[in-house]
Amino acid sequence: MSEQDAQVIRVGVAAYGRISRDPGNDQKGVTRQIQDARNEVARHPSWLMVGEFVDNDLSATTGKVKRPRFEALLAAVRAGHIQVIVCYMTGRLVRNRRERLETYELLATHRVKIVCTGGTDLDLSTPAGRLVANILGETDTYEVEQAGTRVSDSHKQAAEEGRPSGGRPYGYVSDPLAPKHHKQRLMHPEESAVVCGMVYRVMRGDSYRSIVLELNERGIRTQHGGVWTTAALRAVLRNPGIAGQRRYKGKVVGTATWEPIIDPGKWAILITLMDARSRPHGWSNRHVHLLSGIMLCGRCLADGKDIPVVCRNDSKIKKRIYLCPGKLGGGCNRLSRHGDPVDAYVEETVVRMLGEAGVIEDLLMADTPDANEVLKIAQGIEACKARAARIGEQMADDDPDDEILAIARKSALDKIRGELDALRQRQTAMSNATAAAGLLGVEDIAYHWQYVMTLAQKRAVVAALLRVVLLPVGKGRTATTDHILIERR
């Protein structure tokens, strides 16, 4: 063998195969691609197969999915081992603009050719080859984007018509008798019962963690066969599909064609409760006393100011004290009362009222939100936060001596602050109905109030049902229940 022949034989060749979807994982598609590449190598005596690189069931459309064997192929190119890459078509190798530019630049630098068994070969070392590569690549990207548009339009149409799309959610199964082009869902008897139990327990005030622990202890699994997590639980409950509502891009767009597991109004209340749990507004853990922030100071009220009392622990007498805040809180700081007797009297009044006919129903009817409004308010709050964050970033680059710009920024922030306060007030008002929902059908209100309801739920009921005012006591007189004004809202 001559020295020239040895140099020719040392042309390193790599075969690459990829299929975006292979549900059965039979690898028949990539096997055909690699076999075609082997046949192509066999036609060139000077070519030596250095390695075969296969990424099965991996998409390359977005570039976000890691392709281990593709990365290994590029590493071999950087190491100088590869002079030719054989693949079915360039779309199997690269699929999006960013990845295509980076890969083609690398291949051009190392003078690597691309041979396609089902398409046009590319020599990236020449201007003409790079032109053809870019044209083919843009055509490939166009086809991907067009396909994406068609799929998106199809999903949007299905959503507007209330039809299902995608995989099955927990609580439902696909209707085996429905046509393939017109999917339909049926309620899963066991899973739907589990969903109802989840809803009841969350509305009762149980923690997500306690619900998840019980589900896993009972051997109940998700629709994918996995164990439950708090994130999975919240995802199931936040899905409007369980209320027979169809969602598209995070927004409820209409009524679904399948049967709801729970009533849409009840689901909207559930969402309000879950939102209130996750933010320091509405039902907040920072309130550790029944009436702080709810009961008003009678002295300030006489002066035309609605100032809610706060609660402090008095270490000297070892008792809780409700008191009007000082100047920082806008109050008079001239009214205080031992907390336990006040709480006991208000709780006794609330329990008695809740036992009266129609009271719980009135609370629910007063402000039961619909699903779209719940989501709209939540999205509005997030939008306000994002706008405020952008202004904050802009202020960091502002000239500190520019007073006009500073005034403009402050005005914009004040406007956002006002919108945010209004949205949160509306959200808090929605939570009033949520608190009462857990009382429906309860036979022993007093027991339920004392042993079942959380402090947050009790506070929400008190705020929705009553107006409580702490009245001043004259000098030398003893405070009694007569000095607590309670009115039905």
Image (cartoon, rainbow, N blue to C red):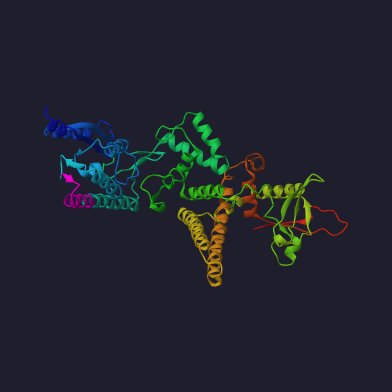
Q: State the residue lying farthest toward the front.
A: 3
Relative side of 434 to 228, left or right = right
Residue 40, x across and y down, in percent? 14, 35
Residue 410 sits inside the magenta stretch: no
What's the residue at 15%, 41% (across, down)?
Answer: 118
Asked whether 359 or 114 is in front, the reply is 114
Q: Quadrant of residue 306?
A: bottom right
Position of residue 334 relative to residue 180, above or below, is: below
Q: Position of residue 370 (x, y in %)?
A: 48, 54
Q: Indicate left or right for 310 with 414 as reference.
A: right
Q: Would residue 158 appear left or right of 215 to someone viewing this image?
A: left
Can you give x and y, in whole percent of width and height, for residue 480 in the image?
A: 80, 52
Q: How many marks?
A: 0
Where residue 332 sits, quadrant-wise, is bottom right
Bounds of the magenta segment: 121-138
Res 356 visible: no
Q: Report the magenta stretch's main SS.
A: helix
Question: Residue at the location (53% across, 54% down)?
Answer: 368
Of residues 372 and 100, the one drawn nearer to the viewer in this rendering: 100
Rendering coords of residue 448 (x, y %): 64, 41
